[in-house]
Image (cartoon, coloured by chain):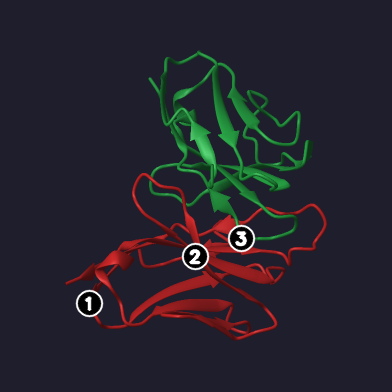
Amino acid sequence: DQQVKQNSPSLSVQEGRISILNCDYTNSMFDYFLWYKKYPAEGPTFLISISSIKDKNEDGRFTVFLNKSAKHLSLHIVPSQPGDSAVYFCAASPWPNAGNNRKLIWGLGTSLAVNP
Amino acid sequence: GAGVSQSPRYKVAKRGQDVALRCDPISGHVSLFWYQQALGQGPEFLTYFQNEAQLDKSGLPSDRFFAERPEGSVSTLKIQRTQQEDSAVYLCASSQYRDEKLFFGSGTQLSVL
């Protein structure tokens, strides 16, 4: 059973517009969430994270929103650029200091295509 | 080097063959992780080291999988008697102590024929 769900396998957006990628989770023990970006033939690259004590975190063109009651988070990219075309993964974990449990639980990813 | 280095980049193995995958983490990173990523899936946790201690190996799919990090730096993931279902990309990541921001290598793509 997928504990982290990215229900849109793909998304296509025009350059300059906003990209919104969604992620839902089922485990209420998750306290920390991360977005990673992955280009073909490369490993995932950390993009942005948010802890459950916040509802928003912003870093340049990237903003992550967390709705704990709905167990939902979203990544906003604005403005979108062709170089943002990649697979985006949502990942979740218990708060980092939760003992030896350091595993991240990942969604299946959303493939974003930003068209010039 | 500046990043996490994995070798080989690609590995083709015949069913039943043993393979060894190497990971060189970022210098000074205490934590090291192995993940398995099948085609069209997200990465799945295999195991976690803090220095040389393997603190969590709950994700290893069977006793054919074995990982070590004897000196707290380089790590090796060994798969014995490979099966077709072992075909995947094996990702290694490292991080600072208790930091969830993982730095990934480019992975080793294993194909078992």
Q: In the displayed structure, would residue A7 be above or below residue A69?
A: above
- Secondary structure of the residue carrying tag 3 is loop
Q: What's the chain of the residue with tag 3?
A: B
Q: Position of residue A62 (x, y in %)?
A: 44, 78
Q: Residue at x 48, y 52 (%)?
A: B42
Q: CA distance from mark 2 to mark 3?
A: 20 Å
Q: CA distance from mark 3 to mark 1?
A: 28 Å
Instruction: Mark 2 vs mark 1: give the one in front.
Output: 1
Q: What's the chain of the residue with tag 2?
A: A
| Mark closest to the chain's N terminus, 2 or 1 | 2
Give the residue pinned by disc 2.
Answer: A5
Q: Is residue B75 left or right of residue A58?
A: right
Q: In the displayed structure, would residue B42 be above or below residue A115?
A: above
Q: Quadrant of residue A82?
A: bottom left
Label the green chain with its letter.
B
- Secondary structure of the residue carrying tag 2 is strand
Q: Residues within 10 Å of mark 3 (few under 14, many from 20)?
A: some
